[in-house]
Amino acid sequence: MIFKSIVVGPLQVNCFVLACEKTLEGIIVDPGDNVPEVMELVLEDDIRIVEVIATHGHYDHIAHAASAVRETGAPFAIHPADRYEVEHLVEIAGSVGIDAEPPPRIDRFLHEGDVVSMGEETLEIVHTPGHARGNITLKWPGHAIVGDSLFAGSIGRTDLPGGDADLLLKSIREKILTLDDGTKIYPGHGPFTTVGLEKSNNPFFAGRTGAW
């Protein structure tokens, strides 16, 4: 699989471009800003984007998703629990001084167990709420894009509308830390990590014994 990442926007979001090496069909995940630079990653391998996906609806992850949709002609997908954040994007972003485009139309709602297909590659959708009601994880063997649920050495904030600390910890323990220790974790912000490192070093989980 082709896998690329770029840090975008004032809040330093990790945006991802993934594609099937054989067919060059691909997806963009979290194009919150800097869409021209994101498109450079797409064009350098002549990738045909078949879907633009948001891990959740917070403005830093979707402020310029409309540009990515417009540039690629691809449909936009997000979990239905974050529909409000998409529909009220300009208002929410503006309340904190962030410039956002009018949001794209939601073409598909992603639910637990759904599959994202790109050529011969598939990713599974896992609903991991707590940071945002609609936060999703996209997983494939040995890898997981987790949105703002889990970070290297930390977890997502839960003081925003829709946040729930207990639910977030439950999501991480039951749906992310149960993956193989070597699974690479790609958070919405900051450095990449692994399941094993977070089980051992993350202060929210380190020292826990028994089944996750």
Image (cartoon, rainbow, N blue to C red):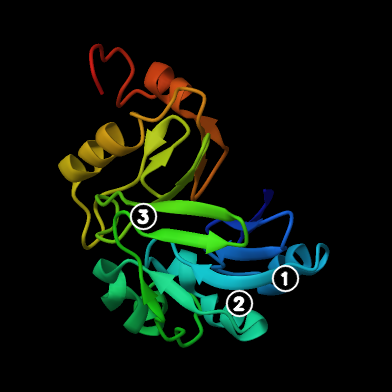
Between 139 and 165, the one lying in front of the other is 139
N-terminal of the two: label 1 or label 3? Answer: 1
Residue 174 coordinates in the image, percent (x, y): 25, 34
Q: Which residue corresponds to the image point at 57% horizontal and 38% vertical from the top-left?
A: 191
Mark number for residue 175? none
Mark number for residue 136? 3
Q: Which residue corresponds to the image point at 33% horizontal and 83% vertical from the top-left?
A: 87
Three-letter code for the amino acid on which mark 1 is drawn:
Met
- The quadrant of the picture occupied by the C terminus is top left
Residue 97 coordinates in the image, percent (x, y): 45, 75
Measure the alpha-carbon separation of dots 3 and 2: 19 Å
N-terminal of the two: label 1 or label 2? Answer: 1
Q: Which residue corresponds to the image point at 21% horizontal and 37% vertical from the top-left?
A: 170
Mark number for residue 68? 2
In what element is the residue under mark 1? helix
Three-letter code for the amino acid on which mark 3 is drawn:
Ile
Residue 155 coordinates in the image, percent (x, y): 35, 39
Query: Which residue is farthest right?
Result: 44
State if disc 2 and disc 3 touch (CB < 8 Å). Answer: no
* Horizontal side of residue 209 vs 9, given as left or right: left
